[in-house]
Image (tube, coloured by chain):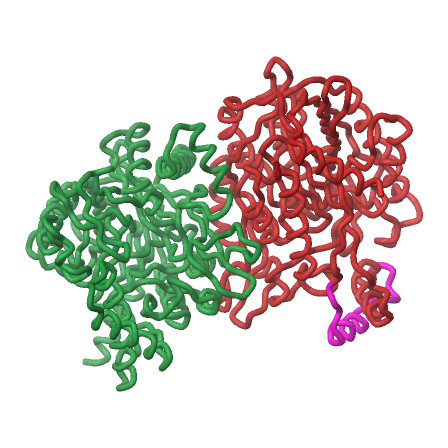
Chain colours: A green, B red
Amino acid sequence: MRITLVALALNLVLLPARAAELRIGTATADITPDRPVPLTGNRSVRIAREIDSRLTANVLALESRDGQRTVDQAILVSCDLCVIRPGIQEGFRKYLAERLPGFDLNKLFLAATHTHAAPVLLQDRYDEKDYGDAMQPKEYVPWLYQQMAQAVVKAWESRAKGAVAWGLGHAVAGHNRRVVYSDGTAKMFGNTNDPQFRGIEGYEDHGIHVLCFYDSQKRLKAAAITLATTAQAAGGNKVSADFWHDARRLIHERHGEDVCVLGFCAPAGDQTPRPQVNKKSEERMCTFRGLTYCQEIGRRVAGAFDDVAGVITKDIHADVPLIHRVRQIELPARIITEAEYAAAKKVCEEVDTRKTRAKTDAWMRHFHGLVVERYLAQQKGGWKTYPMELHVLRLGDVAIATNPFELFVDYGVQIQARSPAVQTFLIQLATSGPQPAYYVPTPRAVSGSGYSAEPTHNMIGPEGAQTLVDRTVEIINELWKMPTNQN
Amino acid sequence: MKIITTCLFAIALMVAGAPAAELRIGTATTSITPDQPVALDGHRGLRISKKVESPVTATALALESRDGEKTLDAAIIVSCDIVAIRQGILEKVREKVKPRLPDFDPAKLFLSATHTHNAPVTLEGRYTLPESGVMKPAEYAEFMTTRVADIVVESWQNRRAGKVSWAQGQAVVAQNRRATYADGTSKMYGATNTANFRGMEGYEDHNLDVLFFWDQQDHLIATAINVPCPAQEAEGGLLLHADFWHPVRQMLRERYGKELFVLGWTGAGGDQTSRPQYGKAADERMRKLRGLTRLEEVARRIVNGWEDTYECARKDIRSDVMLRHCVKQIELPHRKVTEAEVAEARKEAAKYAKDPAQLWNYRWNHGVVERYEAQQAGTEGSYKMELHVVRLGDVVIATNEFELFTDYGVQMKARSPAVQTFVIQLAASSYGYLPERAVRGGSYSAVIQSSRVGPEGGQVLVDRTVEIINTLWKK
């Protein structure tokens, strides 16, 4: 029996990753609430009563087929949301149960663009008293599911024979936001016009990875774009899809209103679209162009897309291998020190005993409370690992790999550098597990400390990140070792 | 004394609230391509050129601000397709210019290098050359400095009333070339597809600062482009060429006039290269789809970035702008040589001492021994660097003599009061790499052999540069 199982497993592993007919479906859902809504992403809640730009969820359904047999499948959903919070993806999969016959719901994942002008998804993210008359998260989420489900079902059911092309462009849309000083400390959005300023802590990756999907007449049907920056060019107190709105608008104007544009955020935990240096010159150039900075970033992204899209039509592929691996992996968790526990405990006690409630209390209590919880669990041998769902896909010569974190850019560079794929399309803030994900800093960031590199916001640290990189590369390598029959 | 006086005069004018004045602009260009085989500079081993792939040129920009017939201030900036402005080159040019331009202060002239590694050697003693069949460095230096002097004179003499504008675009050209590994070490051009690769050591500056110079009819006559990346895309080999600046100039002249003068200014890019350090397969595929060579692809990005700013620059063309040029000798502390470093350097120098083909390696290591001995004797002193800071309207140009790591350029830009700050490295002279955080990682460009001034001196350079810029901005 064991021999049979081993043989079966080997057979599955050694089955060639065959190029096969690619079927593509797309759809877009409007996920903009029509009522005032609390916005997430900041330390205190903001109630949005106006819409700056509409939020969408853009769906790409992929299936590779060998005759009538499905070889593999995937549904990617790019959401104008801040983060796919714990339980959200699981809840959505449950909502979709039985609405997608023939589709393995584990092969669907949600990814957030990280706009900080999107609705709160967790009821207890902030103090409910501060939601006022706005649409509560517990009301928004079921409606969100309904909207997204309609689009997912439409995309899946409308899938038709198509083709894909890929390309790499460049645009300066992301800037490392951690500023380093002469005493070795780092600060997110720190002042750079300072005699103590020594440099920007880390790297920026200005690659724009593009996947274009076509129908059987080679008309552009969808564009998936990933870049290492978050949708935080604008901020503010109105509902907004941030620069993705402007990028999509320009792509629609130039390539057709029906093109489904999926915006993804590559590893960019230490990035922002906002310049940390050269602010005056950037502002001046925006004034010349008559653009807000958010529109300028959208312009750059759309410009990079155009620069690539025209060229890659020379290399469109209809028969490509599509392989989609979904793995539950465990990463070493960041270990909380006694000093960190003591500091977090102190903050919790202060919040709990404060006579006058502050709007940031819920946020502070959550993050510092989590440090306390983790420390106590770790003392008893728990919370030593962090479980996450990892998606790795092969689509032709492109690898796609996800993670749920705000992963610092260096890790994305490592994966790209070590990947055997011609292009490696990375997506952060994708999927959600039972635990929140937050930032994953590099060793140099940990030593510089500051927001995004502290235990309150790091469920895993550099050790866990390295495991993530190594596992991701390992799985990509597995997909590339499989022989293909690509034309 | 003269330099101090010049600076004080400039500052006095600033304090007095000197008005903007008429701007006069002159331009000239020349080939500095030798007509014989020549040793190519920049590598450890000797290379003798076999063929000219693209001409190496020098382009001069003369600026003068005038109040009636009176010159308020001046600058002549020459961009050269050369690896570095070696010791003595600028002095030779100034000597040749001085008798021919009695109304121009030669101290206000500086040369800068694009850092192409496929241009002639200009200093004797760097390599052991064949006895014959090769133009000697001294002979080439004489040829080059004469040609450069000619265009300095020509640009000064043909200056006429003109206008200027400035804009900032982006071009993803510079790639940090120092890979870091799990053990904390770094390596220039180190492999990145390894399990112990941890990331690129430092920053990349993808801003493209551009100056546009116009005649009185708003026709574009010259442009200066600041790219924080040396021109080393196609380095190596035995071809003489200007690297990516050649196709940049060609493309701009095809589109904006064959008489357009294009000055390539290399920004703070000591740790940069235009060659991708990872993702090479994707990059190469795109290049092939476009039907371009790597040089053409780099040029395409620069020209696209430039063109993206062109229409904006046309909206803000100015004729009355302040021109203030401060020239200063600043003192930078030398990097200290440790005992461990000199021991290693002695060993390496001894290894290469007897092999004429290893002259470069011998000198690279023996230099450390000499520095250590001077240090021990208390005679090392500090390095006196010629710093040029030129205010032109709302922008400032600041030079340095190093292959300056990008962090320092970013510091200057962040702390400068100017709307745009053009940092030009390898200007006036050359004094090696100036690393910052890289010292911890080691490897070529950050080890003691590569850098005579280290982070302490680099910080002095930044602080003094910002200080002088601030004086030019004070009302």
Which residue is located at x 80 percent, y 27 percent?
B151
Q: Position of residue A408 (x, y in %)?
A: 40, 59
Quadrant, the N terminus of chain B: top right
Location of residue B34 (image quadrant): top right
Residue occupying the point 17% across, 55% down: A121
Q: Is residue A161 above or below residue B179?
A: above
Vertical placement of B104 versus A148: above or below?
A: above
Q: Residue furthest bottom?
A: A380
Residue farthest to the right? B131
The x and y percentages for residue B237 are 71, 47
A203 vs B120, nearest the viewer: A203
From the viewer's perspective, is A285 left or right of B68?
Answer: left
Residue ranking furthest to the left: A98
Quarter-of-image position of residue B133: top right
Question: Which region of the structure is painted magenta?
Answer: B335-357
* Residue B340 belongs to magenta span: yes
- Residue A451 in the image: state x and y as whole percent: 38, 62
* Residue located 86% across and 45% down the image: B88
Main SS, magenta region, reads helix
The reply to whether residue A11 is visible in this rendering is: no
Residue B370 visible here:
yes
Reply above or below: B230 against B352. above
Q: Is residue B112 above or below residue A322?
A: above
> In the displayed structure, does residue A224 sit left or right of residue A54?
right
Most extreme residue toward the top is B217
> Residue B406: within the magenta?
no
Identified at 65% across, 46% down, the residue is B232
In the rendered image, which quarter contains the C terminus of chain B?
A: top right
In the rendering, at what x and y percent does residue B343 appear? 78, 75
